[in-house]
Amino acid sequence: MASTAKTKEKDAGARERLMEATAQIMLEEGYAAATSRRVAARAGVRSALVYYYFPAMDDLFVAVMRAGADASLARMRQAISADEPLRALWTINTDPRWTGLYAEFVALANHRKVISAELKSYAERVRDIETAAATVALRAQGVDLNEYPPVAISMLVAQIARSLGNESAIGMTEGHEEMRELVERFLKRFASTEHAQAT
């Protein structure tokens, strides 16, 4: 019985290492570089183990995406109860670690239907949470939600953040400082009164 438990623990460790190695390779070199051999070598396991844990590379990519998505969604759910929900969304969406990996999954989704479907499912959940966070922030300030639809406000914050991240990744930074200053003024406008007075 003890040996079975040890085997499961070892299996879980190898599976996690394979997922981490895949994410690292995708971030450093792009999704095309994440082959079963490269992933196995980075994880320090035999290449046959890749297909032992993941029947196809798409299964490995989906597992990596889900792990990142779960962590990201947990952070976004916390944003709803933050003092400044819109600022929390801005911070999450300007995180270069997830932005870079997300861009690779978008590129991969252009070639793999299963990745596209998974990415769409994740994006829909993100949009729901971001809209809820924007609703909380706007209602707290007495903003007319018909004039300023929360879904549109959340998209503005999130998409600007992601766009800055994507441009920064290729070395394009013209206008970024001005945009960040504009967003900062916008976020202060929708900050809670108590928090705004404290800062």
Image (cartoon, rainbow, N blue to C red):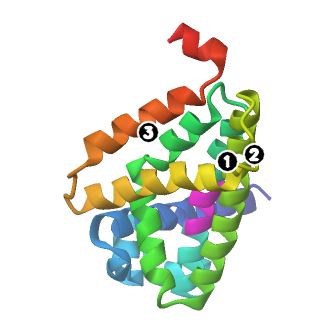
**Residue 126 badge:** none
Which residue is nearer to you in this view: 54 or 97? 97
From the viewer's perspective, is the residue at label 3 or at label 1 nearer?
1
Residue that protrudes farthest toward the right in the picture:
1
Asked if one can make out residue 43 in the rendered structure from this viewpoint, the answer is yes
Q: Pick whichever, 113 or 172, lies toward us.
A: 172
* Residues under numbered marks 2 and 1 in contact, where contact means CB atoms less than 8 Å apart: yes
- Expressed as whole percent of the image width and height from the top left, the position of residue 43 reads 41, 65
Q: Amino acid at mark 2?
A: Leu
Does 128 appear in magenta? no
Q: Residue at left 49%, top 35%?
A: 186
In the image, which disc is placed on residue 145?
Answer: 2
> Which of the two marks, 3 or 2, is nearer to us in this view?
2
What crowding class fits label 1: few (fewer than 14 Cα within 10 Å), some (14-19), or many (20 or more)? few
Amino acid, disc 1: Tyr
Q: Is residue 13 above or below residue 78?
A: below
Q: Position of residue 132 (x, y in %)?
A: 75, 47
* Part of the protein shown in magenta: 65-70
Name the image quarter holding residue 27: bottom left
Q: State the separation of the CA atoms marked 3 and 2.
A: 20 Å
In space, the residues marked 2 and 1 are separated at their CA atoms by 5 Å
Distance CA(mark 3)–CA(mark 1): 16 Å
Give the total of numbered labels.
3
Q: Is residue 158 above or below residue 166?
A: above
Q: Main secondary structure of the magenta part?
A: helix
Which residue is the site of mark 1? 148
Query: Where is mark 3, residue-wise?
Result: 183
